[in-house]
Amino acid sequence: MVYCGWEGAEKNSPLQNIFFMYPAVNDKASPSFIIREALPADVPALAALHVKTFHETHGNYPNSPTYAIREYQWRQAFEGPNNWFCFVIENENPELIGFTKGIPYNHNDLPDFSGELNKIYLLRAYQKLGLGRRLLGHVSRRFLSQGISSMLLFGDAKNPSNGFYEALGAEKLFSKTKEFHGGYGWRNLKALADICPI
């Protein structure tokens, strides 16, 4: 491509001008993002990412979890029972830019679901690039490999990300009093895995 500045913009195609005007789009879209299992060595970076993405999603209120709390929680998770899994996604630097965590779900209140999407966070700067779908695809396929064919999540009823879940076929879960508190579920993880890229 030719990036020759605005004085030569008429010589470029519209696509080339988009890349010239918004180089960050090109920078983020071109790298090969890697999704892999989280490791104990990732705890410091994972804790820092958890704090940052939590603040981006929910705001930075006075009692929000600190780095020290998140680091402790992740260290405890790696030292405890291994009935959970976590995938991280890293950019070309490599730096962690997102993560997701899955755990079994076995509660009488929602017996139709056997897996829980416990966490999914992606830095705002890397959203809308298809990376969230890739993370969901990894979670679905891991659950399916464990014989778990359904999954739910508990979120915030006012979270803007809810449209993302709905676009991928999640159904709203209502309380016994027919209220929606942010819960979503997929009864068929195979269908979800089929529409989420690797």
Image: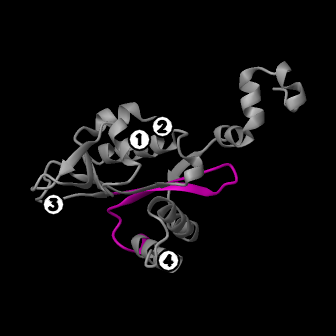
Sequence-first tag of 4 and 1: 4
Q: In the rendered structure, which amino acid carries the disc numbered 2?
A: Ile
Q: In the rendering, which numbered label is found on residue 66?
A: 4
**Occupied quadrant, residue 20:** top right
Q: CA distance from mark 1 to mark 3?
A: 24 Å
- Point out the stretch of residues depicted in magenta: 78-102
Q: Which residue lies at the image location 53% right of the left edge and 76% below the top edge?
A: 67
Secondary structure found at label 1: helix
Question: In front of the other: label 2 or label 3?
Answer: 3
Kindly identify which residue carries mark 3: 107
Kindly identify which residue carries mark 1: 137
**Occupied quadrant, residue 175:** bottom left
Sequence-first tag of 2 and 3: 3
* Rendering coords of residue 85 (x, y %): 39, 58
Secondary structure found at label 3: loop
Residue 87 appears anywhere in the view: no
Q: In the rendering, which numbered label is found on residue 198?
A: 2
**Magenta run includes residue 92:** yes
